[in-house]
Image (spheres, rainbow, N blue to C red):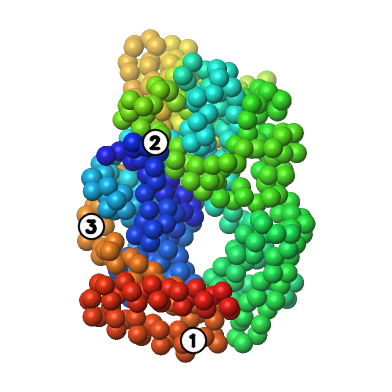
Amino acid sequence: MIVGIDLGTTHSLIGTFGDEGAVLFPNALGEYLTPSVVSVDDEGHVIVGQAARDRMVSHPEASVATFKRWMGTPRETRLGPHNFRPEELSALILRSLIADAEAVTGEKVAEAVISVPAYFSDAQRKATRAAGELAGIRVERLINEPTAAALAYGLQEQHDGARFLVFDLGGGTFDVSVLEMFEGVVEVHASAGDNFLGGEDFLDALETAFAADQQLSLDELTPQERGQLRRRLEQAKRELGANAVARMEWRRDERPFAWEIDEERFARLCEPLVQRMRTPLERAMRDARLQPAQLDEIVLVGGASRMPLVARMVSRMFGRLPLRHVNPDQAIALGACVAAGLKSRDQRLDEVILTDVCPYTLGTKVSRRDDKGNEQTGFFAPIIHRNSTVPVSREEVFQPMRDHQAKLTLEVYQGENPMVERNIKLGELEIPLPPKRTAAENAVRLRFTYDINGVLQVEAELIATRQHYELVLEQNPGLLDPAEIRKRLAALQDIKIHPRHKQENIAILARAERLYEEYVAARAQLQQWIAYFRSILDSQDEQLIREHRRQFGEALDTLEANA
């Protein structure tokens, strides 16, 4: 079975293209959204999803979230006895999703289409593929999130020449893409975005305002207190999506805090973030060479796009109301499922060709001579410009700076700055040059080829001798090499993960422990409930456990509603 996966910053989803079209699979708790959170319990067992999210409050030192932002870096996170890289944390989420899909269908998942932010770099895309490999699946394709959203809306069925802008604001990343439908081809004209802008940043703005109003130093809060506060603020942020005013209460060391914020003030607090959203929007439109009136539709996806201030900003910029009729939390996952159906050549889908663009400019480092003949180095020479439709191949001719030069070092960079020091180095290729030749005689033809899977092939040919050199950039500094992937895959296999059929029990205990942290007045009652439910678990009577879990959940619902 081939599945579609939205591996999100805050939540992840999985599904496939079935008899009734794109369908999502629920997790063990019956929810489609699985929080992208990993935790480790006292015994060193890994917990994933909602239970791990609740443990962010009660056990923050043993839990981690928003690690999608670290993809493509060598950062490691210590959880209990384990050190995890971002690829491994993502692999644990993928393994949980795959287990859910296999439990629902009874089929083995072997292949996947995974969505990634359009603005993900080469290193981040390769890290996502490595996560799939660590999870034991073959990643058939990475699909840009805005392209997936377009498929979820059925925009590929629109008339030829229809143009759309997809605005995707998730928990941790922001993407915008301009697409056009023409003769069965969904072509991406331009992509832009910000990998460090999302719903979490709007929550940060609320947290800062709350601390200022209450004369509270955030640095003085314990990790548990910080987790409790952010959870309450998240609830307030969601309340502002439906009401003009949000109210919240929070208690710290018996001191009660009450706070109120209206939608107007929230919009003022978030104005710098809104301005950051405008820049990628304007860049994408400029790169696509389009005016707002030339767009047929504007689509909002991503959970954070629910905020009214987002819809207002988009409406003002483009002079119309955007489409939001597909659940913004599910749109990208549903589109990934359609892409999985296209990959498996499902007969019910009209043949659609998806094109993507290279999100960054790719080029090499060059030196130049000024008017006085002085050599200046460190300049960036673009070869493939950003938003070139992939697959793409471009070539340029370069020559050494000096006659009789012994070698030529070609450094490969990605970025948008005219100086290489402000761009990202991807690799280098060293070419020995024939001796006793002038610079012109040692000219080199350099070709860059970038494919749909984000692999960059660099080819260099000495024009005079036809000698050929090649560099395939499947490795990036800080990324796992194949040997390291095999080693870490073996290590992950040995890590104990709570079985799926126990997830409901783990989740309800984690929720009760979170409430114990948050509601001091109810601690005695909660401790009694937790002890009683643990005794029921010891009975190993599944029917009895199921009944008491239902009663326990209802009691927690009542407690939280009346607190």
Q: Which residue lies furthest to the bottom in this view?
A: 524
Where does label 1 land, which residue?
523
Q: In this view, does 170 lie to the left or right of 136?
A: right
Q: Position of residue 116 (x, y in %)?
A: 46, 41
* Mark nearer the N terminus (2 vs 1): 2
Of residues 514 and 414, the one drawn nearer to the viewer in this rendering: 514
C-alpha separation, residue under disc 3 versus residue under disc 2: 34 Å
Q: In the image, what residue type sits under mark 2?
A: Gly
Where does label 2 land, which residue?
21
* Mark nearer the N terminus (1 vs 3): 3
C-alpha separation, residue under disc 1 versus residue under disc 3: 38 Å
Where does label 3 land, which residue?
493
Instruction: Answer above or below: position of 449 versus 57.
Output: above
Q: In the image, what residue type sits under mark 3?
A: Gln
Question: Is any atom of residue 407 visible in this view?
Answer: no
Number of residues whose C-alpha sits closer than 10 Å to that of mark 1, classed few (under 14), some (14–19) or many (20 or more): some
Q: Where is residue 295 in the image (x, y as percent from the top left)?
A: 65, 26
Residue at x 37%, y 16% (from the top left corner): 461
Residue at x 33%, y 28% (from the top left corner): 346
Q: Position of residue 437 (x, y in %)?
A: 41, 13
Give the secondary structure at mark 3: helix
Number of residues whose C-alpha sits closer than 10 Å to that of mark 3, classed few (under 14), some (14–19) or many (20 or more): few
Closer to the observer: label 1 or label 3? 1
Q: Quadrant of residue 320?
A: top right
Residue at x 62%, y 81% (from the top left corner): 251
